[in-house]
Each structure stands twice: as C-alpha cells, then as structure tokens.
Amino acid sequence: MKTFISFIITFLIFNFSFSQTKFGNPEVDPIQIQKNFSEWSAYQSKKIMLSRDFVALDILSKEISKETFLDQLANGNFIPIRLKSDDSIYYYKLFKIQPKSDTSINATINQIGFDAYKNYKMEGTAFPDFSFKDLNGNVVSNESMKGKIIVIKCWYIHCTPCIREFPQVNRLTEEYKDRKDIVFISLAEDSPEQLKTFLARKPLSYSVIPDMKVYMNESLQLNSFPTHFILNKEGLISKVLPNFESLEVALAKESKL
C-alpha cells in the first residue's frame, strides 16, 4: 500500500513539474508578490495585460479558455502570474491567493477581472449605432465609417491616466497617418467650451466628440477610463482595451488583417 501511495505522489509531482517546464516557470514568486500591495500593483500594471491574446492556465497548469480565466479572476481568490516565455508569447497562470495576503489585492483583482471579463464579452459584437459631431463640426457616424478600422478613445478632462497617455496616442496617429482606412476618434464627457480650453494646452490628435457622458455610461456602460475600442471594417468590436500599451499591440495586429 505504501508503495502504491508513493507511486501516486511521484506521478503527481512529475506531472506538475512537467506542466511547469512545458509552459515555463513563474517570472516572479507567486507567494512573495502577494505580501505587499504596492509591489503587486506595480507588477500587475506592467506585466498582466488581460485584454491581450494569451494562453490561460489554471492552478494545475491546465489550459483553460480566456473566458473561464477571467471569470475566475472576477469571482474567485486567484492571482494571475505570467510564466517566463518569449516576449511575444503570453502565458498567464492562476495561483491561489494566500490567506494572509493583503485583502486589497483580492478585491482589486476581482474588479480588474470583472472589467476584463465584461470587455472580453463585447468582442465580436456590434458597436452601438452613432452619429456624432466633433469639435470642428464634422459628422462622424457608422455609415460614414463603413469599411474602415475605427480607433475610439473614451476619456474626460480630469482623468489623469487618460491625459498621461496623450503623447503616446498622438504618436500612434502619426504612425498610421498614411492609412486612410484607419480613423481615430475620441469620446469625451466634457462640454465643447471646456474641451477647447483644455486642448489648447494639451493637444490630442484624435477627432474629439464632446458631451458623451450619457452615451458612454448608458450605451457603452463604461465604468473605467481610459477605455479604448478598436472596431473592425465590418463595424464589430475587435478589442476593448484599458491602456495605450494594449492598444498599440492590438492595432498593429488589426491593421494587418
């Protein structure tokens, strides 16, 4: 009997080790990173991009769907850690949150997971019909944008992360300026007067649509900013993204389709 139990234990350890080797080892210590909220937050913001395409693994290193992975982050007690791999390949694995970890980590992961899950479920759906007039009086609508890739930035004047990425998104519009099939527009909560005063100091290369608070709250049901959308040439939502870094990668991929 003891021999049989030893065999089972050895078998399980071998398979667990094989799974870890197959996909790579965690790039940080999953237990150590949970001991300090600031360290975890810095790691999460730089290394875990849930809007990107990635291979999702459960706590036993078994591949699961991205939807299941995000659902478990939103509703469970797990922390996502990237496994060591090539820079262009992403393996994210779930690890159990330790009982003595800062409770703020679990709560924040649940919220991040909830937002990422909601965004993921929007992919492949039609963007709500729209007909907007920008600050220059130009009308932007579903009909006028047919057959084009549309990049949409949702923001407001007092959103610090929204404003911080202005230089980056401005460089992005410059990078794609010769692509007549790619259009950049932004939806802002603020009034035309507020935006004109603000943008005189902080220029944004996107076409800017004012007074979009109700539309973003009710039609798009946004609860975090900035949020970026990429619509494909069929008018469907290709990606919903929380930051410039994810936007840059996703647009590069969409622009080649």
Image (tube, grey):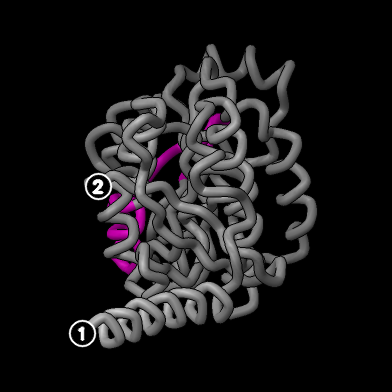
What stretch of residues is rendered in magenta?
A: 117-139
| Coordinates of residue 219 in the picture (x, y in percent) | 25, 42
Between 63 and 10, which is closer to the camera in this rendering?
10
Q: Amino acid at mark 2?
A: Gly
Q: Is residue 74 left or right of residue 179?
A: left
Tell me if mark 2 has few (under 14), some (14-19) or many (20+) residues whose alpha carbon lies within 10 angstroms of its own: some
- Count of numbered tags: 2
Of residue 161 and residue 220, the one placed in the foreground of this image is 161
x, y percent for residue 196: 61, 18
Would you place residue 168 above or below residue 157 in this image? below
Residue at 54% across / 13% down in the picture? 194
Looking at the picture, how far across and down is residue 155, in whole percent?
Answer: 49, 30
Dot 1, crowdedness within 10 Å: few (<14), some or many (≥20)?
few
Quadrant position of residue 7:
bottom left
Please check the rendered image and state whether residue 138 is part of the magenta-colored stretch, yes or no: yes
Q: Quadrant of the C terminus?
A: bottom right
Tell me which amino acid carries mark 1: Met
Q: Secondary structure at mark 1?
A: loop
Label annotation for residue 1:
1
Who's the residue at 72% across and 51% down the image?
172
Q: Nearer the viewer, residue 182 or 58?
A: 58
Q: CA distance from mark 1 to mark 2?
A: 37 Å
Residue 138 at least partly seen: no
Residue 152 rendering spot, x and y as whole percentages: 50, 47
Quickly name the residue at label 2.
Answer: 76
Q: Residue at the front extreme?
A: 2
Residue at 37%, 69% in the rendered image? 60
Q: Is residue 170 above or below residue 116?
A: above
Q: Earlier in the sequence, mark 1 or mark 2?
A: 1
**Front disc: 1 or 2:** 1
Q: Is residue 130 magenta?
A: yes
